[in-house]
Amino acid sequence: MTKTATVYTTSSCPYCSMMTNYLTEQNIPFKEVNVQNDPAAGQKLVETTGQMGVPQTELNGKWILGFDTNGIQEALKG
């Protein structure tokens, strides 16, 4: 089963770039949602997680805040 992550980012966030680069290097498919370009998605994200920071990554029903490679690996385990 292919696991696809959703990464919420902004254009000026270096940790967002680190996260998307890491997912690419690990061959983990992801969808990127830039909350600067999609304010409604940003509002929904805050309502869902209670967090305003980025990156926020949803993978296998788990939320990972920030650039957290250990969090990604844990979410991949299920």
Image: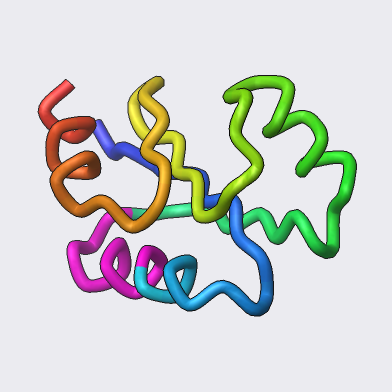
Q: Nearer the viewer, residue 10 or 5?
A: 10
Q: Which quadrant of the rendered structure holds the C terminus?
A: top left
Give the x, y percent position of residue 30.
44, 53
Side of 11 relative to 64 (left or right): right
Nearer the observer, 53 or 10: 53
Residue nearer the viewer, 42 or 21? 42
User: Could you say where residue 12 lies in the image, as x and y percent from the top left?
Assistant: 64, 78
- Percent x, y for residue 28? 28, 55
What residue do we see at 14% from left, 45% from top?
70
Q: Is residue 1 magenta?
A: no
Which secondary structure type mostly characterizes the magenta part of the structure? helix
Question: Considering depth in this image, is 22 or 27 the residue closer to the camera?
Answer: 22
Taking 72 as reference, is 60 left or right? right
Residue drawn at x 85%, y 53% as measured from the top left: 38
Q: What range of the chain is rendered magenta?
A: 19-28
Q: Is residue 76 above or below residue 38?
A: above
